[in-house]
């Protein structure tokens, strides 16, 4: 009789957590308002910058090439990526309860990391495209066909959603019987696993292995592609060609280092026990700061993109070209 009561009791406790409390950045109400203002500005600028690139690629026919099609999709992905977390974080700055339901928490977890995974794949695709364009210029039109370009875009968008199903399902099936306070501003898997009633080493191992293979694999692929590109550029006879190729590679490498550097610190070894404040700062870096910087990095060193953006915002003066021709 007592064993049956204990079993019933354990079943109740494993399903007792119906919501989580996201502590975010504990501070005074005045500081919460300041944080709200700062992150609102960052979110707005991120949306504006990435939307401008998407519109430029969509409207300017000169940018209807694989390189810019991939960049446009990457910027659209950035918009989705930041929207999974920042609006909820902004709402929590003004909220007193700071709660998020169990389902919403794992939905945020799934979409944020799926989009993050897709970003890694798109950075690989963009590196592969630059490799073909610079190292195999004569074969590029034959290899990078419209069909392959479309296939790579579909692959980039879908892979993260497929691959991240397993970690999300495994972590969501862990028993959560309280406490339900997450010392974070989003539903991050590491603090979520720490809240579980039982330490499931199998789930932790699968999650760590998944992250290590994905992050290190994609990072090495990008580094190898860019190394081959740099070697090919050094052999170019034209100084103008060298400068243009180096500008393109430099922009891509800066974005890669910003994204993968912070992700590696955080997720390749989640069991290494980073302090929680450090985890929040690193997560903030790749979830807010990097998407804010990417439009600037990709547009400032790219003359074609700057011209397209001027055209989109109506700052290009048509009489200037007419006067030059005359």
Image: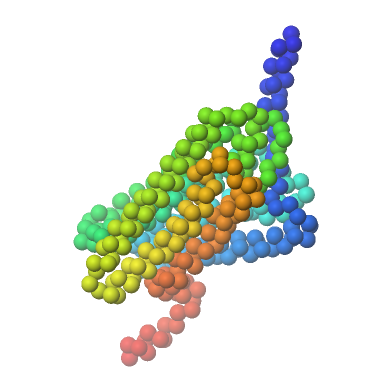
Coloured how?
Answer: rainbow
Report the side of 37 relative to 162 (left or right): right
**Total number of numbered discs in the rendering:** 0
Image location of residue 82, percent across then percent down: 56, 54
Coordinates of residue 209 in the picture (x, y in percent): 46, 37
- Residue 51 in sight here: no
Taking the spot 37% from the left edge, 86% from the top edge, the residue there is 322
As drawn, 308 above or below 212: below
**Quarter of the figure that contains the C terminus:** bottom left
Which quadrant would the N terminus be assigned to in this image? top right
Q: Is residue 258 visible?
A: yes
Residue at point 69% right, 21% down? 10
Q: At 30% from the left edge and 55% from the top edge, which residue is drawn?
A: 146
Q: Which quadrant would residue 47 be assigned to in this image?
A: bottom right
Q: Report whether 35 appears left or right of 50.
A: right
Q: Is residue 112 left or right of residue 138?
A: right
Taking depth in this image into account, of 294 and 146 the one nearest to the observer is 294
User: As displayed, is residue 58 above or below residue 143?
Assistant: below
């Amino acid at each position: 009789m007592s064993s049956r009561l204990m079993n019933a009791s354990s079943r109740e406790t494993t399903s007792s957590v119906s919501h989580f409390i996201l502590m975010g950045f504990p501070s005074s109400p005045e500081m919460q308002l300041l944080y709200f203002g700062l992150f609102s500005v960052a979110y707005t600028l991120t949306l504006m910058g990435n939307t401008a690139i998407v519109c430029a690629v969509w409207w300017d026919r000169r940018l209807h090439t694989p390189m810019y099609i991939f960049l446009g999709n990457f910027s659209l992905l950035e918009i989705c990526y930041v929207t999974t977390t920042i609006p909820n974080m902004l709402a929590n700055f003004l909220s007193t309860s700071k709660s998020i339901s169990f389902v919403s928490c794992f939905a945020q977890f799934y979409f944020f990391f799926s989009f993050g995974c897709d970003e890694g794949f798109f950075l690989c695709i963009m590196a592969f495209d630059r490799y073909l364009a610079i190292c195999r210029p004569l074969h590029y039109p034959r290899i990078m066909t419209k069909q392959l370009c479309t296939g790579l875009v579909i692959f980039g968008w879908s892979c993260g959603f497929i691959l991240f199903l397993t970690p999300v399902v495994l972590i969501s099936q862990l028993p959560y019987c309280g406490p339900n306070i997450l010392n974070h501003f989003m539903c991050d898997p590491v603090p979520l696993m720490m809240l579980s009633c039982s330490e499931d080493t199998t789930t932790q191992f699968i999650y760590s292995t998944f992250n290590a293979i994905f992050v290190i694999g994609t990072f090495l692929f990008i580094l190898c592609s860019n190394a081959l590109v740099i070697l090919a550029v050094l052999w170019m006879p034209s100084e103008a060609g060298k400068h243009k190729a180096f500008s393109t590679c430099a922009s891509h490498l800066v974005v890669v280092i910003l994204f993968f550097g912070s992700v590696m610190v955080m997720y390749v070894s989640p069991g290494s026990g980073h302090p929680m404040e450090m985890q929040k700062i690193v997560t903030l870096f790749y979830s807010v700061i990097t998407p804010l910087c990417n439009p600037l990095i990709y547009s400032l060193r790219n003359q074609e993109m700057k011209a397209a953006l001027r055209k989109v915002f109506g700052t290009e003066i048509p009489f200037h070209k007419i006067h030059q021709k005359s």
